[in-house]
Amino acid sequence: MVDAPSKYHNKVVDILVLDNRIAEIKSSINPASSVKIIQGEDLHASISWMDLGTQTGEPGLEHREDWGSLARASKAGGYGVLAPFPNTLPAIQSKADLHFIKQKAKSHQVVVYPIAALSTDNAGADITEMYDLYMAGAAAFSDGLKTVSHAGLLARALEYVKTFNGLIIHHPSEKHLTQEAQMHEGEMSTMLGMRGMPSTAEVIGLKRDLDLLAYTQSRLCVYGITAAESVKILKEARKNPMGQLTSTVPYLNLIYTDKALEQFDTNLKVMPPLRKKSDQQELIKGLKEGTIDAIVSNHYPIEEEGKKLEFPYAKFGASGIETCFAACNTFVTGLDLETLIDKLTYGPRAIMGIGSEGIVAGAPAHLTLFEPDTEFVFDESHSRSQNNPFLGKTLRGKIVDVLTER
């Protein structure tokens, strides 16, 4: 079992699940013959994994992903809990929109904490009816990977959610430094003749957001940091009283650097971009030290017509929820299994303010069962879009089952 708060952490035990709850945990259990038995020499259990900022596709972009394909892909990747971004058509910005998301997730046995739009239509001009959305079940507010350029609007949003202890999730960037860019700005972009996005764009955006957080004393999750300097700024910021500050990192930035774009693989054309080796090393260090709270799949399905193009014309985004754990478990050096699982389980929940009883008798049986040392070839994606950079590759860390309410 991998569950740091539990007295059974790193121990070999049997877990009996009855009626969607953990009935018993012992070193050995002899269940009735009618009980389904899942076993294995390398079998591990943790609380179910949670992904922040998953792109759903439905409503409006079902050609990329619908809730059926997303649920299959999520469970194949070990995820039982999703907090999806509101960047759909229309954006998730009304009580009816939230009801639609919750009903869709329930019908596919996925636990969902929907994130509502921060600004109307995610356009960055006017804040949404946040209190009404909160009362309707919105777990947080964000415009996804669309950075809010208007500092006054972001400040008002941070101030407004304080009335109900709400959370703003925001991706920092200075768009005027990234327009028409294709990848990270550096030696590789110069060699490939591509317009680059400097790390400075992220750093400038982050500094502004932290100033606004200090001004409002609100709750902010910095989504998708990629730069070494951003990690250092966040580490220093946590020493000062400025509301509640958390952060996430996309998993591909822990595995690849901009050098991987030498072959013009459009499935690695992602936002935020892959950066230098030194950035990657600082991100991993930030996870280990607790500066970064969670790893996100940055699941962004794109239809084939948007990816099978010359690199400058291909859309940004990669399908990632199926391979986030296995790819990190396979390729990320210096990140032990316990830390990796924590950043997929308790880390995301802490950001969202969601408690968990952990794996204890009487708790809901929301579990991910996996074999961390079992290798497999990722030869088939359950996502409607096939824009995953690991298709055809051998990965280590097989998902056995994801238990949720059935």
Image (tube, rainbow, N blue to C red):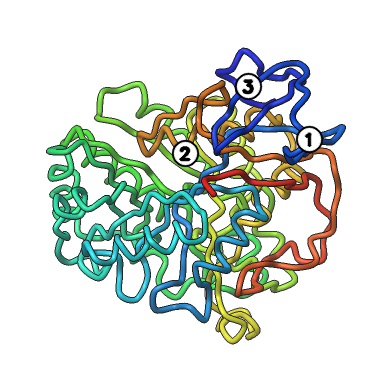
Q: Are marks 2 and 1 in contact (CB under 8 Å)?
A: no
Q: Extreme top residue here?
A: 7
Q: Which residue is mark 3?
A: 24
User: Residue 2's x, y, as percent?
Assistant: 67, 26
For label 1, the crowd category at 10 Å Cα-Cα, with few meaning under 14, some 14 to 19 and many 20 or more, is: few
User: Residue 82's x, y, as percent?
Assistant: 47, 51
Q: Nearer the viewer, residue 179 or 40?
A: 40
For label 3, the crowd category at 10 Å Cα-Cα, with few meaning under 14, some 14 to 19 and many 20 or more, is: some
Q: Quadrant of residue 278?
A: top right
Q: Decide which of tag 2 and tag 1 comes sooner along the chain.
A: 1
Q: Decide which of tag 3 and tag 2 comes sooner along the chain.
A: 3
Q: Are marks 3 and 2 in contact (CB under 8 Å)?
A: no
User: Residue 24's x, y, as percent?
Assistant: 63, 21
Q: Is residue 143 left or right of residue 358?
A: left
At 64% from the left and 40% from the top, the residue drawn is 368
Q: Nearer the viewer, residue 274 or 361?
A: 361
Q: Which residue is mark 2?
A: 348
Q: Given the image, on which type of amino acid does mark 3 rest?
A: Glu
Q: Given the image, on which type of amino acid does mark 1 rest?
A: Ser
At 36% from the left and 54% from the top, the residue drawn is 114
Q: Are marks 3 and 1 in contact (CB under 8 Å)?
A: no
What's the distance in space between the residues labelled 3 and 2, CA to CA?
A: 27 Å
Discs 3/2, front: 3
Q: Is residue 284 above or below residue 76?
A: above
- Element type at mark 3: strand
User: Residue 195's x, y, as percent?
Assistant: 52, 72
